[in-house]
Image: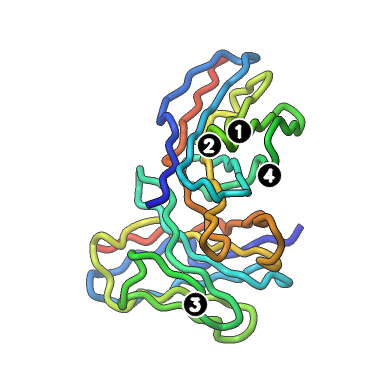
Amino acid sequence: EPEVTQTPSHQVTQMGQEVILRCVPISNHLYFYWYRQILGQKVEFLVSFYNNEISEKSEIFDDQFSVERPDGSNFTLKIRSTKLEDSAMYFCASIITGTGAFQETQYFGPGTRLLVL
Amino acid sequence: QKEVEQNSGPLSVPEGAIASLNCTYSDRGSQSFFWYRQYSGKSPELIMSIYSNGDKEDGRFTAQLNKASQYVSLLIRDSQPSDSATYLCAPGFSGGYNKLIFGAGTRLAVHP
C-alpha cells in the first residue's frame, strides 16, 4: 500500500542552525501539508502546498519557514534559523485531488522528531 | 478562531467494554469529519471519516455526527488493550485548502 515517507526520523540541531525535513508524498497525490506537534500538545497545521506554491499557511509559518517541491517527488520543509521552541514532531501529509464537495482523507507520514538544543 | 473541543481524559475502560469519545466543533461550515488514532510518538492514523448526519459503522467503530449540535462522537465496541491510544477529532475546515484542525485528543486506556 502506498505511503507517505519522511526523513530523517530524528534530527538534533543547535539553535540557529538550518534544518531541512524531507517528505515523499504518495505518488499520485497533488496537495501536500506540513503539521507539527509539540510534545504533549495538539497537532497544528503549518502549511498547505499545491501546484508548486503555498495555498495556505498558519501564523506559526513565519519567515523562518519555507517549503519546496524541488524534484517532483520530494516535498521539503526548511527552518532557516532554528529556535528552541521549534522542537517538535513534524508530520507531512498528502491528499489526492483536493477537489469535490467533501474533504478527502489526509495520509500522514511517520514524522520527523526535531530537537533543537 | 476555529475550535475543536475534546475531553482530554484519560478515559479508562475495561477490556470488552464500549468506549465513547466525544467532540464538539465551532466551524458550522465543516462538512467532513475525521477520527484519527495516535499512539505515543507515532503519526495520526485514520480510523473513520463521516460526512452525513447519523451513524456510520466500520467494524468495531461507529462514528456519529450531528451537525445541528456541532457534535461528533466515536464509539469503540469490544475495546481491546491495543485500542489504548489518543483519539483525535479533526473536522475539515470549511474555509481552507483541506487543512485539518485537530482537537487536543482524548487519551483512551483499555485495561485487561
Relative to A101, is B90 above or below? Answer: above
Residues indicated by labels 4 and 1 sit on the same polypeptide chain:
yes
Q: Secondary structure at mark 3?
A: strand
Q: How many marks?
A: 4
Q: Residues within 10 Å of mark 1 (few under 14, many from 20)?
A: some
Residue furthest bottom as drawn: A71
- Residue bearing the label numbered 3: A54
Q: Label 2 near label 1: C-beta < 8 Å?
A: yes
Dot placed on the residue nearer the N-terminal end, 4 or 1: 4
Q: Residues within 10 Å of mark 4 (few under 14, many from 20)?
A: some
Q: Say left or right for B62 vs A44.
A: right
Q: Label 1 near label 3: C-beta < 8 Å?
A: no
Q: Residue at x 30, y 62 (%)?
A: A86
Q: Residues within 10 Å of mark 3 (few under 14, many from 20)?
A: some
Report the quarter where the N terminus of chain A lies: bottom right
Q: Secondary structure at mark 1?
A: strand
Give the CA separation, mark 3 to mark 1: 33 Å
- Residue bearing the label numbered 2: B70
> Which amino acid, mark 2?
Gln
Taking depth in this image into account, of A100 and A27 the one nearest to the observer is: A100
- Residue bearing the label numbered 4: B51
Residues indicated by labels 4 and 2 sit on the same polypeptide chain:
yes
> Which amino acid, mark 1?
Asn
Q: Residues within 10 Å of mark 2 (few under 14, many from 20)?
A: some
Give the CA separation, mark 4 to mark 2: 12 Å
- Residue bearing the label numbered 1: B66
